[in-house]
Amino acid sequence: MKNSVIRNASKSAGPGNAVRAALRSGVVLFFLVAMVAGGAFAQTGKLVTLKVGATPIPHGDLLQLIKPDLEAQGIRLEIVELTDYVTPNILLADRQLDANFFQHLPYLNDFCADRKLQLESAGQVFVAPLGLYSRKYKKFEDIPAGSVITLPNDPTNEARGLILLENKGLIKLNPKAGLKATIRDIVENPKRITFREIEAPQLPRTLDDAAAAIINGTWAMQTGFIPSRDSLVLEGAESPYANIVAVRKGDANDPRIVALLKALQTQKVKDYLNSKYNGSFVPAF
């Protein structure tokens, strides 16, 4: 873009104007960021729109919480509620969203590699611990031999769930599988558990038939579970799978995105997560 500015300016007004044009284009982003920092969007009296796709709990709740804070800065936050793990990234890549808020970085990286998308993280907000839930058993040890356990079918969360179960001694995985483990990498299964891979949003529905299910914190909360209270097994706060705000590559410095992250990474958000969700979601900033 800068080269195009220089060429056009050179043709019309000579090299001196070309340099000035290039300098002007180079500092536009700086001044936009400064405008957000100084609340200049609000001073214009005209709101700019920021369209963010998010799953309902807690992502959508957090966006609703900070919506007035962004509006005070001159940014109208438009929240698009989505209920799956594919559509938000497709819409973002297609420029139908300015950002999305539903996933962790390993999932984003795998998704982009598979779909050849140019997306990146603008910053992390909280950890939604993965847990094992059951409507039939009160303790992890009570799950009988020969039972069925369901788990997410996307590569990142499937491996994450299997590693959680391995850490609890239920199974043993091929050590070479690492963070790419699937049910085909189970090398020891003394209880002869049958594992079924299911799309993440559908996992709570399997609890009527399966002995237990590995469910992401978002879907567990949406089903009515409190992870810190109701899970049979739960990831620790040290989990590296922090939920992020994702944007198209190069957009992390968009002043609207900068303002969004700043609003999400506050004590107000920490207090809300702790009080509303009983510590089931852990701030990651």
Image (spheres, rainbow, N blue to C red):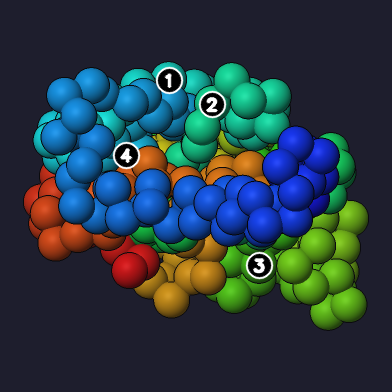
Q: Which residue is mark 3?
A: 163
Looking at the rendering, in which quadrant would you find the N terminus? top right
Quarter of the image holding residue 94?
Answer: top right
Q: Earlier in the sequence, mark 4 or mark 1?
A: 4
Q: Residues within 10 Å of mark 2 (few under 14, many from 20)?
A: many
Res 270 seen here:
no
Sequence-wise, the earlier of marks 3 and 1 is 1
**Label 1 crowd (10 A; few <14 / some 14-19 / many >=20):** some
- Locate residue 196, reporting x and y percent: 74, 38
Q: Amino acid at mark 2?
A: Leu
| Left/right of residue 219 with respect to residue 62 in the rendered view | right
User: Which comes sooner in the sequence, label 4 or label 3?
Assistant: 4
Q: In 3D space, how far apart are the residues under numbered discs 3 and 1 (Cα atoms)?
A: 33 Å
Q: Residue at x 79, y 73 (%)?
A: 178
Question: Are the residues at dot 1 and dot 2 in contact (C-beta closer than 8 Å)?
Answer: yes
Residue 35, image x, y percentages: 28, 48
Question: Which disc is residue 80 wearing?
Answer: 1
Judge depth for marks 2 and 3 and give the one in front: 2
The CA span between labels 4 and 3 is 24 Å
Q: Check disc 4 and give the amino acid type.
A: Pro
Foreground mark, 4 or 3, reads 4
- Viewer-nearest residue: 78 or 142: 78
Q: Amino acid at mark 1?
A: Val
Q: Residue at x 43, y 20 (%)?
A: 80
Q: Which residue is mark 2?
A: 97
**Label 1 residue SS:** strand
Q: Nearer the viewer, mark 4 or mark 1?
A: 1
Q: Nearer the viewer, residue 273 or 231?
A: 273
- Quick one: label 4 or label 2, which is nearer the N terminus? 4
- Give the residue drawn at x 37%, y 58%: 126
Q: Earlier in the sequence, mark 1 or mark 2?
A: 1
Judge the density around disc 4: few (<14), some (14-19), many (≥20) Cα neighbours within 10 Å: many
